[in-house]
Structure formats: C-alpha cells, structure tokens
Amino acid sequence: MYKLLKFQFRRLFLRSSLYVCLGVIAVPVLFSFYGIASSTLSNIQGADYSMFMIIRQMISVANLTTLVVIFTSIYGCEDSARGTIKTIYSLGYPRYKIFLSKFIASSTAAIMMYGIVLLFSIICGLLFAKPVGSGNIISDFLGYGTEEPDVVLFCLQQCFIILGAHAFYFMMSELSRKTGISIVLGIFAPGLISSAFGVAVMIAVGVIDDQKFSETAQNIFFTFSQYWLPTTLSSLTQLFTGTTSVNLWISILVNIGYVILFGGLSMLITYKKQIK
C-alpha cells in the first residue's frame, strides 16, 4: 500500500492541472483579500468584517466545487484515457488497494484546494477582522460570546463538504471513464437528482390529498435540499443572512456518510468494470 500511495502522490504532484486549479482558486481569493484590506484600512463605513464573515466570503468566491470536479475528473479518468490502468493492474496489487491509493491522493488534492482558501482567509482575518461579542479574535474562533457560528467547527464542516462532494465526483469519473462526461455529470447530476426528488414530492403531494402528508413531504424535501451536495455550500452562504439554518454537526455527519457511500460505490464500480 505504501508503494501505491507513493506512486499516486508522485503522479499527483507532477500534474500541471493541480497547480492550474490551485492558481485559479487563489486569484479571486487574493482579490477578495485586497478588497477587505483596502476597505478596512480606508475606514469605509460598514467595512467591519468578523473572522467568520471573511472565511465565508472567500469560500463563496473561490468556485471550489467546480474546480474540484474538474480536477477529480481529469485525475480520475487519466488511467483509462491513457491506458496505464492495465500496467498498474499487471503489477499484481489488489484492486481495492489501487482504488484506495488513488482515492486518497485525489482527496488530498481537493483538501489542498480548500486549504488555499482557508490559509488566506485566516491570514486576512488575523490582520483585518474585527472581534465580535467577545472582543477577542481567538474567542471568535471558538464561537465564544458571539451569535456567529463556531469558526473552527464551520471550517471543519466546510472541509467535510469538500470531501463529500469529491467522493461523488470521483464516483462519476469511475462510472464514465471519460473526462468530459465525468465533468458534465459532476456538475449537473447533483442538481438533476435534487430536481427529480422535488418533482416526485410535488407529484406525491398532488396525488395524496392530505394536509399532514403534504407538510411532512415538504419538510423532508426542505431538509434534503439543505444537506444535499449542490445546495449545501449555498445554504451555508445563506446561513449568515438568517434565511436558512444548517446544523454544522449534522452536516459533518451527512458528508462523512457521503464519503462512505460514494467511496464504497466507486470501489464497487472499480471491481465490476472490465479492463480493456
């Protein structure tokens, strides 16, 4: 397993696509950093940012999920596209070890992309954030004396969102084996699933003329929409405005479930697919 991990990480850090994605993520984040710094130093009215506000803003401009799906599709489909998968399997390693080494390396790339955003967010926050409630930035990190979410828990939850989304995108790459198709599926499939579920709920409510059933079905769909892949980041953006409420602990557990579910399905697809 160690040799496979070493091999996959060497491949990972030799991929120019990784550094392109990291650069594309860094550009809007740095612009946001500059905007926050300029408005704060210029004492513009209303330019008081808390640590949570800075992190949330930088996550919202980074286009993380789009770039994660692009890189995961490129990396995940590379072996099939180049035909190197035959060589890897011919070495005699069990398929699950080959899968796990590749999945871990790909997950690391996704975390690196999130890490770029988090690094600049924390630096910007330490330099320019205004303490809220407690009057102390460290206390703000831990959520003491403030109505804002626990910043550490929020960052952890965002990390698991990225891992959950990555697991889904990796499954799409294993399923399609074609980079272009994998990207399209990764971008549009979560939304289509959400829409299909919404239509099913609407049809069920229309067919079953019962007020209690209607309220229960709508509540289920609303909860699903809060924690499902395409809406989970946007719902957290709305969290600060008070238009929705997402339990951070539940979100972490749900996304751990996504990693297990989609990772397991990806491994199953790997075992079932034929090598050509």
Image (cartoon, rainbow, N blue to C red):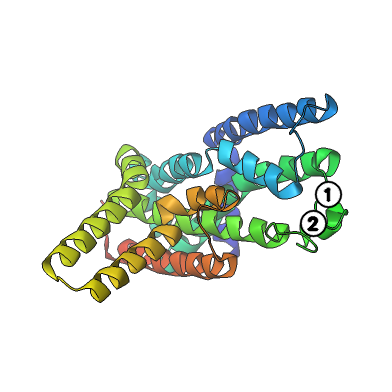
Q: Is residue 265 left or right of residue 70?
A: left
Disc 1 residue type? Answer: Pro
Look at the picture and state if 57 lies above or below 143. Answer: above
Q: Is residue 192 left or right of residue 126?
A: left
Q: Work out whether residue 274 can be spotted.
A: no
Marked residue nearer the N-terminal end (1 or 2): 1
Q: Residues within 10 Å of mark 1 (few under 14, many from 20)?
A: many
Kindly identify which residue carries mark 2: 140
SS type, badge 2: helix
Q: Work out whether residue 32 can be spotted.
A: yes
Relative image position of residue 185 (x, y in whole percent)? 31, 46
Front position in the image: 129 or 101? 129
Gap between marks 1 and 2 measured at Cα: 7 Å
Look at the picture and state if 15 lies above or below 245. Answer: above
Front position in the image: 56 or 28? 56
Residue 131 marker: 1
SS type, badge 1: loop
